Structures are given as structure tokens and as C-alpha cells.
Amino acid sequence: MTLGIRPFKHGLHDVGARCYAWIQPDGGWGWSNAGLVVDGDESLLVDTLFDLKLTRAMLDGMRCAESVAARRFDKLVNTHADPDHCNGNELVPEAEIIASRAAALHMAAEGPDRLVALMRQAPAMGETGRFLLEAFSAFDFEGITWTLPTTTFEGEYETHVGDKRVVLKQVGPCHTAGDILVQVPGDKLIFTGDIVFVGGHPIMWTGPAANWIAACDHILELPVEVVVPGHGPITDKRGVQAVRDYLVYVRDEARARFEAGLSVYDAAMDISLADFDSWGEAERIVVNVATLYREFGSTEQPGDPIELMARIRRERA
């Protein structure tokens, strides 16, 4: 089943009524999407990108597109705290930056320094370092000034771009601590952040799975026709349903292996991913299983998630 409703091409995509998506193939590690809503002289940006070079190119592309006519960005919404969705915040200094309170706290506690240190150490880290270099060597994390949200909320928050109503709904914790959805009701459009991955395995850093499944159900109940995922091609509700199906499947398969006494790693290796052969980043299964095991009451300490994913990638290849 093809889940993309637009060609999976890099750059700016018109998704109707002066709303736009910035799409980055191949949608894998760090290759996130962003969005833009424009009305009159006002605009709202949905997320920035993983480094300054990519974000600068995106902003230039938006400013130069004749149909957009956005010369400044009044508001910026960060859908969550993962750095591939907020590392470029400093490049829109004029914007009010909006995020959930939980995402803002997560951002304040982390910053870009960890990635800088990891990438500097990667050449000496063996298999784990090779994984990091394969996943992230295309990005430059040096020199980023961590720029935090200026407006935070809990639950639901409504704002406007010109006459357009924009509804922000907190659905995390699930993928991360403070995930939100950005809906433009009048245009039957939603930007999902990393609640939706298309063509790649979702990764459940935080959980619980029930919240993520409920977030998918919420989107499926909305009168939306165009879904801009956090990663992958523009989709519709079929892309949301595919993520929901994956989460339910992995939850149930992990539960069976937990009850059988398998370790996190052995369970991740044992779960069949044949129905998701075409999806990238299969190594994320081990993080998902570890999060689910914690939900099930496990006290196992499976180890560093990056090391586990590096090992899973090699052994499941």
C-alpha cells in the first residue's frame, strides 16, 4: 500500500490555501519535515530542522517562493523536543516560539551538546560509532545556539495566523515527553510531528504506547484530508492508520515475549517485522520493546539505546 499522496521530493510542497510542507527525503534519522501556514501578512512555522545549514536553506526557500510571500515568521511551533525539530530555532529570532510545557522542559534539560560530543567521539566507538556516523554524519551540530520556547501550554492551545485558526493539541507523552499536533481546521490539514512516520519505524522514546495509539485515534476522528508527518512523504489517514497498526502489533508481540520471560534484546530480535519490510530504521524496535517492557513492569536495564540499535542493525541486516 502506498501511503504517500504527493511525490516524495525534497523542498517546498503546496498543501493548499497558503499552507506548505517542507519535505526531506529519505525521512530517516534526522531527515525531518516542517511546515508553514500563511494568511495575509502573518505566518507560522511548524518546526525547524536538524542543523543551521538545513534550516537556513529551508527558510530561504520559503522566503523566495513567489506563492508564499512570507518574509518573516511571526510564530514558530516546536512539535516536540527532538533536536531534528528544533535545532534551527535561533534562525527565526523574530518569532514567538510555542511548545508544550513538557517539551520546553525537555529542551531546557538537554541542548545540542550531547550530539556534538557523541559525534566527536564516534570514530573511536567501534560498532556504535559506525552507527552514529551512518545515521548523523550528514549533519553539523557545531555552533548551534540553543533557543527555547517563549510560550508554553498544557492540553490545548489555540492561535491564529491572519484569519486562519490553528489548534495545538498536546498528545504526549508518547514519542517524547511533550508531543503536540498542529491542526489547521479550516484547511483540513494537520502537521503531526513525530506522531506519524511514513516509510520508517516509529521510535517510542518515552511512551506509554496507549497515549500514542490514542493520538492516532484522535487524528483519525478529525475532519482532515492532508497529513504532514514528522518524517516521510505527505500522507492522509492511511499513513496514520499504518502507524497505529504498527504500535498495536509491537505492543502485543512485546507483551507475549515479556510474559514468556525473554529479555528486551531477545524479544526485539524475535519479533517478526516482515509486514514492515519496506520501512527503514528497523533497529528502532529495540527501543520500542525496552519502553514497552518498562510499561509492563520490567526492572531490566537493557543498556545504552544507541549501542543496542547498532547491534540490532547489524544482526537483523
Image (spheres, helix red, strand yellow):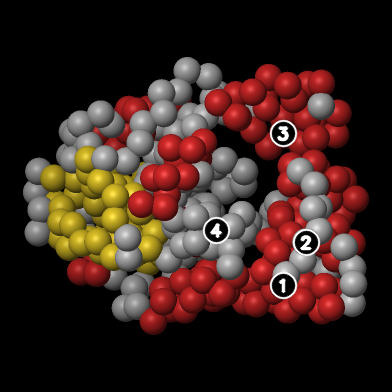
Discs 4, 1 touching: Cβ within 8 Å? no
Residue identifier under label 4: 175
Q: Which SS class for mark 1?
A: helix
Q: Amino acid at mark 1?
A: Phe
Task: From the viewer's side, name the closer residue of 173 and 9.
Answer: 173
Q: Which residue is mark 1?
A: 296
Tag 2 residue: 299
Distance between the Cα atoms at labels 1 and 2?
9 Å
Label 3 neighbour load within 10 Å: few <14, some 14-19, many 20+ = many
Residue type at the position of mark 2: Thr
Q: Residue at point 90% right, 72% down?
A: 261
Which residue type does callout 4 highlight? His
Frontmost of labels 3 and 4 is: 4
From the top left corner, tell me how far across and down residue 291 is, in percent: 68, 61
Q: Earlier in the sequence, mark 2 or mark 3?
A: 3
Q: Amino acid at mark 3?
A: Leu
- Residue beneath label 3, please? 132
Image spot of residue 114 (x, y percent): 60, 29
**Mark 4: few, some, or many residues within 10 Å (few <14, many ≥20)?**
many
